[in-house]
Image (cartoon, grey):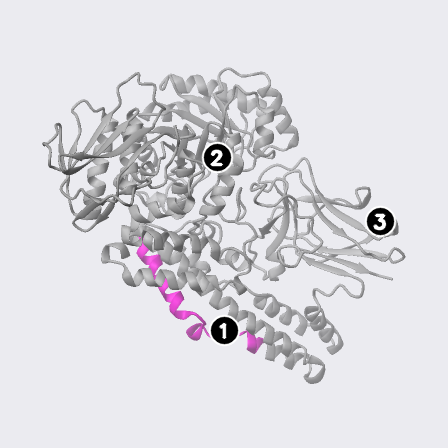
Amino acid sequence: MKSTLAVLVLATAAQAADLTHATVVAPPGLTGPERKAVELLVDAVRERTRITWNVAAADPGTGKPVVTVARAASGAGLPAEGYHLRTFDHGGAPGVEITGNDERGVLFGVGGLLRALEMRRDSVTLPGSVDVRTAPKYPLRGHQLGYRPKTNSYDGWGVPMWESYIRDLAVFGANAIELIPPRSDDAADSPHFPLPQMRMMIEMSRLAKEYGLECWIWYPAMDPDYSNPATVAAALAEWGEVFRQLPRIDAVFVPGGDPGHTEPKYLMALLEKQTANLRKYHPKATMWVSPQGFNAPWMEEFFELMDQHPAWLKGIVFGPQVRVNLPELRKRIPKQYPIRFYPDITHSINSEFAVNDWDVAYAQTEEREVINPRPLDDAVIFRGLQPYAEEGFLTYSEGCNDDVNKAVWSALGWNPDVDITQVLRDYGRYFIGPDMADDFAQGLLGLERDWRGALLTNSGVDTTVAQFQDLERRATPQQKQNWRFQQALYRAYYDGYLRTRLMDETQRERRAMERLRTAPAIGSAAAMAAAEGELAVDPLARAGSELRARVFELGEALFQSIHMQLSMPRYAAIDPGRGANLDLIDRPITDADWLRRRFSEIRALDSETARRGAIDGILNWSDPGPGGFYDELGDPLNRPHLVPGQGFEKDPGFFHTIRTGFGSRRNTPWRVSWYRHAEALYGNTLQLRYTGLDPAAHYKVRFTQAGDSTPRATRLVANGKYEIHPMRKKDAEVKPVEFAIPPEATAGGTLTLEWQPNPEEAGNGRFVQVPEVWLIRER
């Protein structure tokens, strides 16, 4: 049976079916989840049209429009969760029949119809005729819904909002949710919580049970020493109390790290006991584990334990910070254990699937949990990796910023070959309205394109702003209050303002550098004062002020509509990197702050000669001298010697591809070139390759190291055999360091420099991070 989840293929030659006055025929024998599906159908139509469809147990008679909802006869051998959706003639009136293969099939059949309907004020129509049989490709298609402080919106949601959102996920084919227990790597409370965490967890588990959806728990093992029997006993009691209170649990997933850091042999022993603990309250529930955050020795220990085929364990989860890629994990894990994918769809930097070659201006302002529709990237990630995780997926999410991505992943989980643009049209039709379906879909694709390439030259950003401004002018009052519409507007206006700023401030910096070049003629003090004047921005007359003002208006609207926390002082967000990018909207995105700091340092020098020399250092920062080379490794357009690897299309997890990373913002201003870097993940190395060198010359290498605040150690080797320096932790302060290159390494006219990670490192995998490299010819 063919799987499909995009809007149903409609016969355009057929007349649209007018279902405005339809009756929903639902037989009395429907189960509880099937009755909830009928409620969803009626409520969704009413919310969008002001029309309340009648629900009847029997056909109201021919000549009247009907929508029938039923389940196929048991024992029919139909694929799980599938459905048959068809139109038919009902005595001269339109009829629609939804027949689910099982309970969930009824729910997803209702979702299929809702995605296809054109619902307007006081009108419901179905364009054309329909006859589709469909079932999902992957058995697990879900999303993590963490009611905890460390989110950008979820902690402000009450039970009605959660029910509405879980319904929305089901309409696009999701069959599972994943909850987080009260104790995790979070604060004990949130000022936004409408209910205590345990009580809300119970309510969300209840909702999953009522709708017939799977309920998973992401449960970190956070205690420091599980080799201690007392620690294990306490954990069994704590977890058992959570298990006891939840109405439904289908599975528990325990990450190996982040949070928690337990040697595999102790972790697996704990989980064997926790599995028995779980089954006291939920006899059919299963246990899953991920080797997250393990270093190389622990990873091998984990594989050895898996080769013992633990009977209590159901499967393995592949997610962030697993140091082998998914295809290799599938090879190393015994086939009896299915693999579940845990893709991070919510973060844009410093994450499992960071935005490929993102512009540093975006990274410094929009940050880690920005509203992030990435439909085309999602398709690349899914189609490249999901086939190795046969169980399916539950995504990693920290809030509603990734809402579009959830819909796309759900659609791909149903049909991996689905047309992504059509999924976005379904999204626009169902959530925004049929008259904006295509325009909204194209706008979402535009937002993803805004993040491609250099922001300074990406005029498509301006086009996207114009497209959404046109939608805004056409929008009804109800659409303007729609949080999904507001999210897209927020991103478009933010991107547009940022580009306007960048163009203005880049010009200011160029003029400032010209002023510095006058130092020999007018003196260093006057040149620096003139440069500072060029860099100064009047807050009351900044470029793009109207765009900026609209961003703030939309930020307020999103707090009111969906409790999105886009600012710490305004909306009590937990951190700027957790979605509060209103607080970062004016953050420096050029070298202006670093220049001001350098000017202060230069003024303190004791001679004019020294001051002019320091100014020359600024002006000629990237000049490697005659016969030398400079690579700014965080700039995709300025790293000609980098060995890039396979590339995002073939390696979306960047296991064998160098990716652009971004450093943590420090109190001391940095150059832009220090905020971005090239990074190699896990056990991979970062290589630069040079050709055409002078065999008779002597060279030295100069480089800077920045990135994460953790002082990780790397080793630098030339041509695979000449050690330039042994394992060395990067300095706390970013500054150029230099090392001689042995003449033997360049005697053949070529050179490969390789930064190698420490195999003992564990954690996030970002072990090699290098912003800049100069290869300097000395003589």
Can residue 124 be seen? yes
Magenta highlight range: 532-559
In the displayed structure, 161 sits above or below 226; it is below
What residue type is disc 3 on? Answer: Ala
Q: Residue 234, located in which quarter of the rendered image?
A: top left
In the displayed structure, 56 sits above or below 454; it is above
Q: Residues within 10 Å of mark 1 (few under 14, many from 20)?
A: few
Q: What element carries label 2?
A: loop
Q: Is residue 350 magenta?
A: no
The mark closer to the camera, 1 or 2, is 2
First along the sequence among labels 1 and 3: 1
Q: What element carries label 3?
A: helix
Q: Mark 2 points at which residue?
A: 342
Tell me if 459 is positioned left or right of 176 in this view.
right
The quadrant of the rendering that contains the N terminus is top left
Q: Name the residue under label 3.
A: 745
**What is the spatial separation of the Cα atoms under label 2 and label 3, in whole angstroms?**
44 Å
Q: Where is residue 628 shown, x and y percent of the image?
A: 78, 61
What residue type is disc 2 on? Answer: Tyr
Is there a contact, CB below 8 Å, between mark 2 and mark 3? no
Q: Name the residue under label 1.
A: 537
Tell me if 702 is positioned left or right of 742 in this view.
left
Residue placed at 68% from the left, 36% from the top? 759
Q: Where is residue 338 shown, x and y percent of the image?
A: 50, 24
